[in-house]
Image: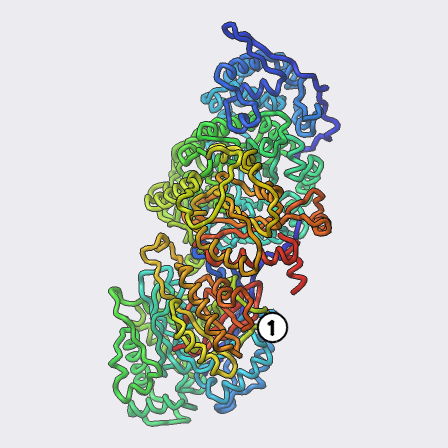
Amino acid sequence: MKTITPILEIDVPEPQSDEIYSKQILGKQIRFKGLKKLLGAADISKAGDRNTDLAPKNDMIRETARMILSSLTLQYIYDHPLTDDNNLVDTVVRIGYDVDHTVFNSISFMTLGDLKDHLLRSDGQEIKRIGRGMIPVIAAALSKLMDAHELIFIPRKIFTPTKARTLIGVPGSLSFRIQPNHPKDNLDAISLMVYTNLALGMGDCLIGVNPAEGSIDTIISVITHIDKLRRETGVPTQICVLGHVKTQLAALKLGAPVEILFQSFAGTERTLTEEFDVTVSYMDQAYNTMIEKGPLRNVARQFMYLETGQGSEMTYRKHNGIDMTTCEALCYGLCRRYDPFMVNSATGFIGPETHLNDFELMISNLQDNFMGKLLGLPMGVSPSYTLHADTHIEGQQMTTHLATAAGANFFMDVYLGTDRMLAHFVNSGHDDQTLREVHNRIPAPEFLEWAKEKGIFEQSADGCVTRGSEWGNPRLFCKSAAEFQRLRESLPSAPGFDNAGPRPVNKVQRTLLLNQSIGREAVHSRLREDELEGIDFRVLTTMAQCREDHLRRSELGTMLTAESMESLGPENKDIQIVITDGLSAEAIHHNIHDLLTVLEDGLRSQNYSMGQHILVHYGRVKLTEHIGDALHCQLIIMLIGERPGGDALSSRSMSAYLVYRLNDAEVRRQAIEYSGNKGIHYEYTLISNIYMGGLPALEAGSVVAEKAVQIITHKAAGNRLEEMIMQKK
Amino acid sequence: MKLSNRSNRVTMLGLDFGSTTSSAMVATAGVEHSCTTGRMGFGVPQVEYRSKPVFTPFNDDKIDLARLDGYIDQWISESGIRCDTLFSGGVIITGLAAKRINAAALARLIGERIGEAIVATADDPRLESWLAFMGSCSMLSRFHAETPFINIDIGGGTTNPAFGKNGSVLSTGCHFIGARHFQFEPGTYRLISMSPYGKELLNDLGIEKCLGKDLSSQAINAILNFYIDALEAISSGNTDFFSSPTTNRYQQVPFAFESTEAAPVLVFSGGVGELIYLENQGKELPGTTHYGDLGIDLAKRIVQSPLLAAHISDLVPDNQGRATVYGLTLHSTEISGSTIFLPDSDILPRRDLPIVARLPIDADAKQILHALSLVEATPNGACIQVVSGESNAGSPVADMGIPICESLGSVKSFGQHLRDVCMQVNPKQPVVVLVPHNYGLVLGNYASNWRQEPFNLIVIDEIPDRNAHFVTIGRLHNNIVPVSFYGVC
């Protein structure tokens, strides 16, 4: 096992003040202030970097930045550590300097351009050697100098095998993590997804569930269940539930089989500690706990699973002025510290705020794989697309082919590619088998032997692996047809289990893609005021002036324009209803008439005063607070379209946010005491899933009306209200 | 970090007291919204406990309550259940155990020992057939959604056939054909007792009654031939078989089913059903009349019948000998939606309510007034069932298995009529309304003028019509209630 270098023993050069980097191109002086700006400008322009003004404005600026960057020596980059907003070196950057100094000294004289050429001329052994002496920022800078061929050509020469129960990452292999997520952590649905994907020959690196609910009892319940499935099927793999590291360790302490310990990482200390709630010190302890107490401590060489992804630091605006690619490289420096079994980026998951389109998705994933492999990590990628970005199944699939060619160790495997729990789309088992067949790859050796015994794969005398007679047959793992049916009923949205070659049959694909198209259309639809006749409303506008603004910069939808703000003054009504599209205008059109009729009847029966309804295009939930502050109402009820996932009907799903304004000093004091949040001014109650397949609109109207009465009566919302009601009972 | 109580698992109990054997089962299941329909329902159940079947203890025809009490003790102890935490449960008392005096005594004993969560029914042959189908092959039938199934539950006293498709029972019957009409000294054919139906069958077959003596192999064959002929008639829809005066007496509830393009698949449950599958799998059965009856012989003969045994190898149902108790445990109860209308939570449970009217959602005030007058005429309150009238055919969700919710106009109108009628009648009894889809709260609110009218109105939603005479509504549990039906029409 790796011995961790104490943080204070890692030497980092003193921060330098920002230098000006400039170059004259045909008489035009192009300047960059500081290394961060230079790094940002040298990258392909991506939405996240555009939002933070780090992306190059045009190709000429980018190529100038690349030219300057490629002339800098490695020693120069090393001597200019990136700093946080207080001009300090944070812990994440510091960890990146934990390198093999002998190796670094042997290459420090090279410019980045020289190093690029050297890597292209070198074999895998030499590239790996250099990687050991490389700080993450150098890897990031290199990735910006590489074209697509180079981002594929260099990492494909590097192999970093890791071993738990299975050995992954050996030449010629391609592995997959089954990701049987379910929005309700339904264990039967998880069983069916595990069976289905095992039958597709997947799961050789991990069966890993992202729990919908992150409590210890959920973690224990889910991990115990997948441990049972692992034992019953006999599959040689390892298991993980991707809760927070603290919860996983608590579960381990209670005896749960936490075989692989997971955590998400960020590339700045502020994001890591304030948003992801871990410190490097805590992770050091966690790693040592796994060495001492992990169930696989006598079997595995590695047992950590770390996930990253471009853009999380930017999303929280805690990126310290560093671009997304470089932040990602800093994550990898941190990952390297824990000798992980698996690392993957989940780039594309956040949406159009970070990656607008398929091109940005492709480049970022190739960069991730390049940087991770160069820094010595067992790297996989999980390119994903969402319906509110201009990313698509085709772009995602092309990305996986490019990443496979670039030597990625593994990908995800979500049932039919649709993750209903996280409302995004990634690889399916069919995609994965297609990748294996196109790129001539096989599973981890232990898994392959098991899959051959099960008839999932066959292997000819000359070693060629093909699909076996049981490939794609999830019934293989069920004792009876009735048991399969029972499991199947836990996943009613499953459109079918039949296959055509390594792909799902056409009928299944048509259903999946039709559902996606309906969801995408809902995201991009507009509120049609003429179809809302009969509803007496006033129209306000947010700072998001168009659909694109709304999707790419979510904060704009939380603020009214100055003109709209001026139109509002204190009305001192009991209740204000706000209708906005959110991420599905169709949800509003499908539910609003029934819901509003019942809601108004219910509120009027209690003689509440109500302001004229407000209709807002491109609104987000936090807008309620602006409106509440302006109108001085007690309660704002916002009716808003939810983010569509992979089900056609749920793209018509609406939420009602009941937002109580804590205007009374004593009530606010109680709310502060309850929440521990001294800045609290509003409390929220959410009623979601309002659509035909969930809570029908007419019943929802009644539920919202009764909840409004409770909120006003108890002068509380959210968990505080529910506790008060429980205590009364 | 939190330790949440996210689990909404409930515990259910089933107790089956038959002529021959009695058994218990405990299962747990999550209560959750279906991802597709949004309806509340049980998730995939986990059977936590199955008792070994015990011979139902009788002293002559009278049930031995003391010994039965001992069995109940044993089942509670072995299963580890706490009766006060049971969500729902059912007790079915059939055959000899269902004789009037036995049923009443048994129901009383169970009420004292288990509590109010459990609903006892006696001599309800259609319900028994329905439960056996649900416990035996409802899942198999849903897997082969286009194939009609007949489940034939053969117990000690009766054979309970049920015909269904895609998991739903479409017709049921009951016949006095069973393993225990002739009781022998175990290991021999020495006849020691006969049921009235056994006696009549010997008469019909011209066999001399010979209590205390061995029945000849010819006599055994004649009895078994009759049973096989009857079972073949039942399974092929030949209702003529039971039309003669001699055969009609073996038919308690006629069994008929619509003819289908594909012949129905036969599956078996009950004690004899279990023996059939064991025999077919080549497993060694106990010796002749080991159980002191004809169950083993009957099972062997069924396996030899090409008609009856056509699918016993390829379509094997669940639970077999325990199908009824499984059906009872899991299927005797409907779960309400989570947005029901109650004046206060203490108004539940309500037990043994007659269903006095079935109304469409577009019923007018006169129809509702009539129904309410029937409720008022009952001593302890009664129930009105709103039946689903609107079809989702042609709607955008027609293919998605989603029940269409009645329109706001219909619901509001029904609610306002109900309010007007209640104000006119001023009901003294709680008015219980069961509705098939998710609109209980809104209907209750319109009918009570948003809880401002004084009458006791209960609206329980997402309860389909079970075509039964009586209903029991259990206690509120995390915003839902169990609803049990009996007296199936």
In the picture shown, does residue A296 fall above or below B448?
above
Residue A473 in the figure: left or right of residue A320: left
Image quadrant in which the N terminus of chain A is located = top right
Q: Is residue A106 visible?
A: no
The residue wearing badge 1 is B83
Residue B164: which quarter of the image? bottom left
Give the residue at x 42% y 87%: B183
**Chain holding disc 1:** B
In the picture shown, does residue A604 fall above or below B49?
above
Q: Is the residue marked by circle 1 packed among few (<14), some (14-19), or many (20+) residues within 10 Å?
A: some
Q: Is residue A659 visible?
A: yes
Give x and y (percent) for residue A670. Answer: 72, 51
Q: How is the image coloured?
A: rainbow
Give the residue at x 64% y 48%: A661
Looking at numbered disc 1 in the image, what kind of residue is underneath it? Cys
Give x and y (percent) for residue A128. Answer: 57, 24
| Element type at mark 1 | helix
Give the residue at x 46% y 22%: A148
Between residue B484 and residue A191, name the one nearer to us.
Answer: B484
Between residue A149 and residue A20, name the one nearer to us.
Answer: A20
